Image (tube, rainbow, N blue to C red):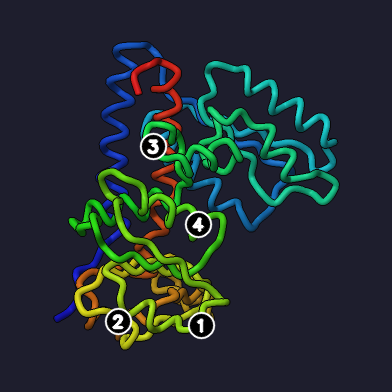
Amino acid sequence: MTAKLIKGTDIREQILEEITAEVAEIKEKHGVVPGLLTILVGENPAYISYVTLKIKTAHRVGFTEIQDTQSVDISEDDLLALIDKYNNDDTINGILVQLPLPKHIDEKKVLNAIDPDKDVDGFHPVNVGRLMIGGNEVKFPPCTPAGIQEMIVRAGVETKGAEVVVVGRSNIVGKPIANMMLQKGPGANSTVTIVHTGTKDLKAHCQRADILIVAAGVPGLVKPEWIKPGACVIDVGVNRVGEKPSKKDPGRMVAILKGDVDFDADKEIAGSITPVPGGVGPITITMLMLNTLKSLKFQLGTQ
């Protein structure tokens, strides 16, 4: 039996429609819309496409979007002063500083300078602590883990009492999604195991997972014999393994992307599975928009 596809592109559209409707309602009632700020230091071609998509999505859902581009030689003190200015601007609900920063600037110091109540990426130590406590303390869960949990819930997968195995222990995906899935509440309440490079029998742990979340950064790591029949498999990996001619423009080469899961083989064993591309990736920016909307609602006292 071929697994049900959990398509991030479809879930993204559902969530963006919900955000757009709620923004319109807030605008009508309170006369304000969420404000999202992105600070760029210099212009790095590596993140231009991501920033462009972020701007496009913000405009689509009715946000005010500001891009503040600074010279690559801005001093650390001046950048910190700029962040402080936006921390005190009530029209800005979310502040993002695009990484990487130039070597003369301490990234950790800059990210920690963002007001935790405007840290819509969810990486400030205060928000990491809130996530660990769970419940009503959580304001902004990190976007990719939040998207993973949303996909699991919207796919109708039962999480209460489920054996969840997370492959990978990064601060961006592995650790936060593990913590989110073990919390008491809807879309969680699971028994969670984290496996990593130091784990002795990776295969055995994966085989008992009702929900397998793979964020290892190793193409094709998870083989079909690692999958429990009927399990939900969430593939977070996006690995560039080569190039191929574009279908639209054969003269242009595009990346060949492969996940951490052997998709073609594993989909015959799993009950549900995310594709790569088109799975977890499209959800991340969507959850960023949701966090920014939440920030405004906290400000208005309606969240």
Residue 132 seen by the camera = yes
For marks 4 and 2 on the same chain, the one whose residue lies earlier in the sequence: 4
- Asked if marks 2 and 1 touch (Cβ < 8 Å), the reply is no
Q: Which of marks 1 and 4 is in front?
A: 1
Q: What's the distance in space between the residues labelled 2 and 1, CA to CA?
A: 22 Å
Q: Mark 3 points at which residue?
A: 290
For marks 1 and 4 on the same chain, the one whose residue lies earlier in the sequence: 4
**Which residue type does callout 4 highlight?**
Lys
Q: Is mark 3 on a helix, strand or loop?
A: helix
Q: What's the distance in space between the residues labelled 4 and 3, CA to CA?
A: 21 Å
- Asked if marks 4 and 3 touch (Cβ < 8 Å), the reply is no
Q: Name the residue under label 1.
A: 200
Q: Is mark 2 on a helix, strand or loop?
A: helix
Q: Where is residue 55 in the image (x, y as percent from the top left)?
A: 50, 39
- Local crowd size for mark 2, using a 10 Å CA cut-off: few (<14), some (14–19), many (≥20): many
Q: Is residue 38 left or right of residue 204?
A: right
Determine whether 125 is above or below 297 in the image.
below
Q: What's the distance in space between the residues labelled 3 and 1, CA to CA?
A: 38 Å
Q: Where is residue 29 in the image (x, y as percent from the top left)?
A: 30, 12
The disc label shown at residue 266, or none: 2
- Asked if marks 3 and 1 touch (Cβ < 8 Å), the reply is no
Q: Name the residue under label 4.
A: 175
Farthest residue, direction left: 1
Which quarter of the figure is the N terminus placed in?
bottom left
For marks 3 and 1 on the same chain, the one whose residue lies earlier in the sequence: 1
Determine whether 84 is above or below 214 in the image.
above
Farthest residue, direction bottom: 225
Q: What's the distance in space between the residues labelled 4 and 2, CA to CA?
A: 24 Å
- Asked if marks 1 and 4 touch (Cβ < 8 Å), the reply is no
